[in-house]
Amino acid sequence: MPAVPAAVAVHLQCNGKMEAFTYEQACEIAEDFEDLVETEFLMGGIWYFVEEVLVAPSGIPLDGPEMQQLRLGVFQADESADHDVLIAASGEGSGGITTYIDIRTYMLDKGISYNMPGE
């Protein structure tokens, strides 16, 4: 298996603890935001290029083999577990490090109003 690229997590806790999504909710949200793929955005003074919008099990190690398998489409997640929606992006001058930004952080930073399924 190829080496796992380094990863950085950008995660913002909103109103205390963030509620995770069900698998179905996360898939719906990811589908709504899939148009972000292959676009750029500015966050924290850094330009990012969106590689992928992912549905990932909550707590998945971002720099571990599970994330690599998820991105390759070979990771079998437990659909009954809690999930998050992550934007996988490469930052300007990041040296190949993938940054994972949770969807709520992205929406808050961009001022996007969105009715989350189930909320």
Image (spheres, helix red, strand yellow):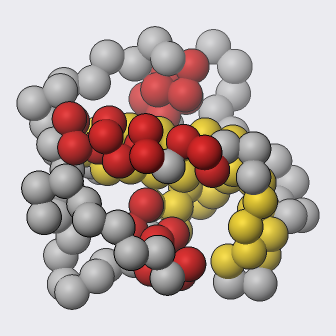
**Residue shown at the point (67%, 77%) measured from the top left:** 43
How many numbered marks does the figure carry? 0
User: In the picture shown, does residue 49 fall above or below 1?
Assistant: below
**Residue shown at the point (77%, 59%) measured from the top left:** 40
Quarter of the figure with residue 48: bottom right
User: In the picture shown, does residue 75 fall above or below 118?
Assistant: above
User: In the picture shown, does residue 34 fall above or below 118?
Assistant: above
Query: Which quadrant does the C terminus fall into?
Result: bottom left
**Residue shown at the point (56%, 78%) measured from the top left:** 110
Residue 76 visible from this viewpoint: yes
Image position, residue 37 (x, y; %):
66, 43
Which of 103/17 is in front?
103
Residue 60 visible from this viewpoint: no
Horizontally, residue 111 falls left or right of residue 85, namely right
Image position, residue 14 (x, y; %):
28, 82
Horizontally, residue 118 falls left or right of residue 75, namely left
Image position, residue 15 (x, y; %):
21, 86
Which of 92/112 is in front?
112
Query: Which quadrant does the N terminus fall into?
Result: top right
**Residue shown at the point (55%, 28%) measured from the top left:** 71
Which of 85/99 is in front?
85
Quarter of the figure with residue 79: top left
Image position, residue 61 (x, y; %):
41, 45
